[in-house]
Image: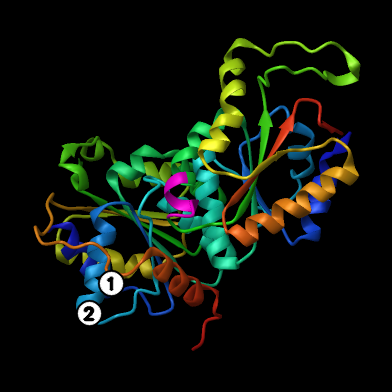
Amino acid sequence: MLKGKDIVHFLSKHDVRFYCGVPDSVLKEFCMSLSFRSPSRHIITANEGGAIALAAGYYLASGKIPLVYMQNAGLGNAVNPLTSLANKEVYRIPMILLIGWRGEPHFAKAPRGEPGQKDEPQHRKEGEVTLPLLKLLDMPHVVLSDVPSIAEKQIAVAVKTAKRRSTPYALLARKGTFEL
Amino acid sequence: MKRERAIELILDYIAPHDIVVVTTGKAGRELFELREKRRESHAQDFLNVGAMGHASMIAFGIALAKPKRSVWCLDGDGALLMHTGSLALIGALKPDNLRHLVLNNGAHDSVGGMPTAGFSVDMPALARASGYRAAARAATESEMAKAVRRLARVRGPAFLEVRIERGARADLGRPSRSLTYLKNRFIDFVRKERRR
């Protein structure tokens, strides 16, 4: 499995050093690895839309790609700034999104090889619409591997693509991707 | 005093190296036209044409990356109330180069003038309670001139509510430059180190 700090390390190789977002249980280990960063490098925002806007401001002023993290439930809060601020028809802001995927349908591979099970009711619909929503938003995305060497390559592609297209790129993290 | 007049007065106190982020709707269009009228560059201004309520977070992100530059957020009452959680975050983290100005006409003026709760909220008290270092209200042109001059000088995050009337010019245009052009000019201006 991936350690939270692995992701931070892989991202730093591509000069992604600013993080903001809203914590999520799927991303807990990742979020904990950010907890000692100063506010100039990590900010927990009031909601996910605010995180997109904060990241956009940071990019405009620094030229560096930021990372925004959230639970998929927060994707709804992020849709407006993603479509009307960061979108390629508007200001084309590159950034990496790390989204914890609750309620993933057909969650076949549960941690430790247990049979897959349904997530709680409030997560099921959001889990189901997460991939279609990313497609509708025309956002390139990938399901993050829990194998560090693969995740490292995925992150390299994510940053390269975000830069080349000058738009957001999403990494989807399934339950059980991270460990401490 | 209407919004366009208020923005014009504010522009007199914004230094040439300062950065401006303006809220969604007619405020940005007025700022654009005022720059044209004053024969000033648009490079200082970021028009948040969409993402209503998020201008203050864009400004905060810029303020973080450019701690030595003053960043002004020209916000609206509807926008402020839409994402008031951002006020708490700015108050908690205290970016000392952020100046947050709310043009309060108590209405969603850009889309027809329907009411907001803007006039029933004590905005300076809200800002102070959130942790802003300074907060004030102005309602007349002379009060405003004094308050904006002070806002430009105090340590941030600083907040000013300006009570204005509803209404805009009937012939208010749309930015005549593409967003890509405006963005690139803005980026050049912001990323370039300040020269004295």
Is residue B104 a member of the stretch shown in magenta? no
**In this rendering, does residue B95 appear at all?**
no
Label 2 crowding class (10 Å Cα cut-off): few <14, some 14-19, many 20+?
few
Labels 1 and 2: the sequence-earlier one: 1
Quarter holding residue B68: bottom right
Q: Which residue is mark 2?
A: B38
Q: Quadrant of residue A151?
A: top right
Q: CA distance from mark 1 to mark 2?
A: 10 Å
| x, y percent for residue B190 | 50, 73
Task: Find the magenta span and give its range.
Answer: A83-89
- Residue B194 drawn at (x, y percent): 52, 82
* Depth order, front residue of B96/A55: A55
Mark 1 lies on residue: B11
Front-lying residue, A113 or B112:
A113
Q: Is residue A82 above or below residue A156?
A: above
| Image coordinates for residue B165, horizontal then vertical, percent | 13, 51
The dot on residue A174 is: none
Residue B14 lies left or right of residue A131; in this view the side is left
Q: Chain of mark 2?
A: B
User: Viewer-nearest of labels 1 and 2?
Assistant: 2
Label 1 element class: helix
Q: Residue at x 61, y 16 (%)?
A: A124
Name the chain under label 1. B
| Residue that appears at 22% across and 69% down | B33
Asked if residue A63 lies left or right of residue B179, the reply is: right
Q: Are marks 1 and 2 in contact (CB under 8 Å)?
A: yes
User: Residue A68 versus residue A108: which sits nearer the camera?
Assistant: A108
Q: Quadrant of residue B52?
A: top left
The image quadrant where one finds the N terminus of chain B is bottom left
